[in-house]
Structures are given as C-alpha cells and as structure tokens.
Image: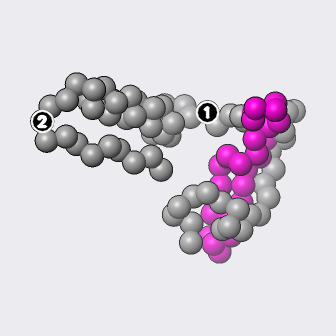
Amino acid sequence: MKNLPLAPTEYNQTYQTELNTIITELDANMLKLDAANFLVSRTDSSGNIDQTGGLVLQSPDGTHYKLKVANGGAVSTSAITTEQSSNPYVT
C-alpha cells in the first residue's frame, strides 16, 4: 500500500503534481469492473519469472486457491495458506 503525502496548508504545484502521479500509478494497477483485466507474469532483474502475483479465489469452505495458466493454456489451481497470500483482506 502506498501512502499519500500529507497535504500542505496552502496550494503547492509540486505537491499537486506528485499527488497526481501517485494516483495515476495506483489507478493503472487497479482491477477495472468495466474493462478487461490482464494479469501478467513479471520478471525480476535476473530475468526469472516472478511467481508472487496472481489471482486467488476462495472456496465456500474458506480454502484459498491460486489460479495458474500454463503456456499451452491449461488452467490449474493450487491451495495456498493465508501466509502465502499478500492480500491484506485474507485472515
């Protein structure tokens, strides 16, 4: 989570520019309800695929499953513990 800077007591163009930049960056990473959302693999500085991100679904019994897609399009899931999820709403 990114914290927004505290507002100055008077209008400040530099502050406003910084705030606009932060909000634009945050918005670009949000899921949209009225558009297609793409979750893509990222690579780290060594070129290795970063496996930390992804879509996690919760079953009716409370178990969490991470959704995966292979290069050929095969879809699979794997159970994860709440400690493996970066979702702050998972308890």
Residue 26 in the image: state x and y as whole percent: 44, 37
Q: Are marks 2 and 1 in contact (CB under 8 Å)?
A: no
How crowded is the residue under tag 2: few (<14 C-alpha within 10 Å), some, or many (20+)? Answer: few
- The label shown at residue 24 is none
Q: Which residue is mark 2?
A: 10
Q: Is residue 55 visible?
A: yes
How crowded is the residue under tag 1: few (<14 C-alpha within 10 Å), some, or many (20+)? Answer: few
Residue 25 in the image: state x and y as whole percent: 45, 32
Q: Is residue 73 visible?
A: no
Q: Residue at x 44, y 46 (%)?
A: 2
Magenta region: which residues?
Answer: 43-69
Q: Nearer the viewer, mark 2 or mark 1?
A: 2
Indicate the secondary structure of the residue bearing disc 2: loop
Please tell me which of labels 2 and 1 falls first in the chain: 2
Report whether 40 appears left or right of 90.
Answer: right
Residue 18 in the image: state x and y as whole percent: 34, 30
- The Cα atoms of the two marked residues, 2 and 1, are separated by 40 Å
Residue 79 falls in which quadrant of the image? bottom right
Residue 85 in the image: state x and y as whole percent: 65, 60
Amino acid, disc 2 = Glu
Assess whether residue 63 is covered by the magenta stretch.
yes
Report whether 50 appears left or right of 61.
Answer: right
Q: Which residue is mark 1?
A: 38
Indicate the secondary structure of the residue bearing disc 1: loop
